Image (cartoon, grey):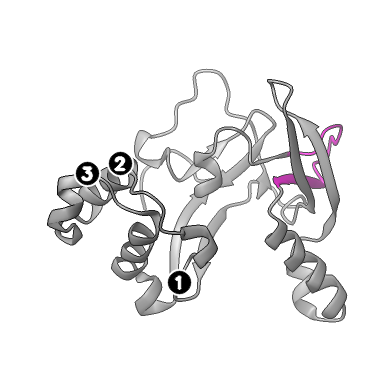
Amino acid sequence: LAQGPVPHKGHREPPDRSQLYMATSDGLLIAAGHAANKAGSIRAADGEAECNTILKALDPNERSIYCSLSAKYSNDPILNYTASYSGDVMTFDEFGCPCSFIRLSNLLRSFHKPKVLDVKLGVRTFLESESSSGPGRRDLYERMAKLYPEELTPREHERRAVTKRRFMMTRDRKSTIQALGCRIEGVAGLSAGPAL
């Protein structure tokens, strides 16, 4: 996550990159999945002119990992390249509903015009708990029909629905994640200039 300039009025991003990154009203550049969540899963911490920390929607597992890193590996050099956790923040959304966030250091605060690359590492990109096979979903069926039509079964066509687990397993198998152990999810900070 990086702080960057807010696009000026009239500035238009190329439409084919709109799912990959987004510039928020507070000047943050967000790559990949977080960019699709327009509700604000990542935002600048209030009252910080320099954007030294960011707020990210609270995920108890992620918070546990940050706490474990600082407690168990306090002398590990990797911590120089890992955001540090500095507590939870409770705030309210535009409707007055409570929202919980974790406060993380902004690793790119000292960079001028940073470029961000969101890369998934490993041979599977989801936890079983994230993909419980509940009822099939029409939106995932439509995505799968567009991306991997040959993978759909006659039953899935008939129901016009796919479970989240099935979609995620197919996506991992059909992308580079299982074969290479990584997948590029998105980018941020690129100009709308000519492709290289």
Disc 3, SS: loop
Gap between marks 1 and 3 measured at Cα? 25 Å
Q: Return the residue at label 3.
A: 160
Position of residue 89 in the picture relative to residue 27 (left or right): right
Residue 47, image x, y percentages: 86, 32
* Residue 32 inside the magenta-drawn segment: no
Q: Return the residue at label 1.
A: 124
Disc 1, SS: loop
Q: Return the residue at label 2.
A: 138
Position of residue 136 in the picture relative to residue 51 (left or right): left
Gap between marks 3 and 2 measured at Cα? 6 Å
Label 3 with label 2: CB-CB less than 8 Å: yes
Discs 2/1, front = 2
Dot placed on the residue nearer the N-terminal end, 3 or 2: 2
* Residue 45 inside the magenta-drawn segment: yes
Query: At label 1, which amino acid type do we have?
Result: Arg
Query: At label 2, which amino acid type do we have?
Result: Arg
- Tell me the magenta residue range: 44-57
Q: Residues within 10 Å of mark 3 (few under 14, many from 20)?
A: some
Q: Nearer the viewer, residue 6 or 18?
A: 18
Residue 97, image x, y percentages: 72, 27
Query: At label 3, which amino acid type do we have?
Result: Arg
